[in-house]
């Protein structure tokens, strides 16, 4: 998403409801962009429980529904690193990519 949309999302209060978010974004962006940005804002709010680090910024509804919780994904990554020390591992099943840099 572009920097202007990101800046607008950062200005939104976390306790706003979807209608207030939509109205705020519609004042700044065309309808289609405002709708997508509002959906992303809502998904990021839902993602906080699964991904407390806040690393995931690009989300889809389906991707978030299928994503493994961050703590579980980190433990899985640690096990792989312990089993194959020093190896470069690509996880083809990582989905949204909730763990990186281990």
Image (tube, rainbow, N blue to C red):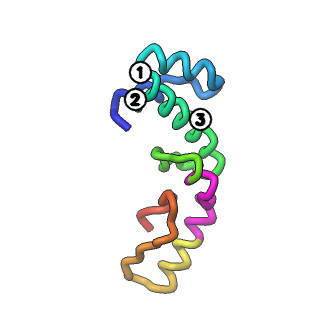
SS at mark 3?
helix
SS at mark 1?
loop
- Report x, y in % for residue 49: 65, 47
Q: Name the residue located 60 percent from the left edge and 46 percent from the top edge.
A: 47
Against 97, residue 54 (above or below) is: above
Q: Which mark is residue 42?
A: 3
Q: Which mark is residue 5?
A: 2
Q: Give the range drawn in magenta.
A: 63-75
SS at mark 2?
helix
Q: For the residues marked 1 and 3, what is the alpha-carbon distance in whole angstroms?
A: 18 Å
In this orientation, which residue lies closer to the viewer: 102 or 58?
A: 58
Direction from residue 48 to residue 9 in the image, left or right: left
Against 43, residue 80 (above or below) is: below
Q: Residue at the front extreme? A: 32
Q: Which residue is tagged 1? A: 30
* Neighbours of disc 2 within 10 Å: few (<14), some (14-19), many (20+): some
């Amino acid at each position: 998403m572009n920097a202007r949309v990101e800046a607008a999302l950062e200005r939104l209060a976390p306790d706003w409801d979807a209608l207030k978010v939509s109205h705020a974004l519609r004042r700044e962006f065309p309808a289609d962009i405002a709708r997508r940005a509002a959906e992303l804002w809502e998904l990021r709010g839902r993602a906080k429980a699964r991904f407390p680090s806040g690393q995931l910024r690009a989300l889809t509804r389906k991707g978030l529904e299928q994503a493994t919780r961050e703590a579980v994904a980190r433990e899985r990554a640690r096990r792989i690193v312990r089993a194959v020390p020093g190896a470069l591992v690509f996880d083809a099943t990582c989905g949204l990519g909730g763990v990186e840099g281990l």
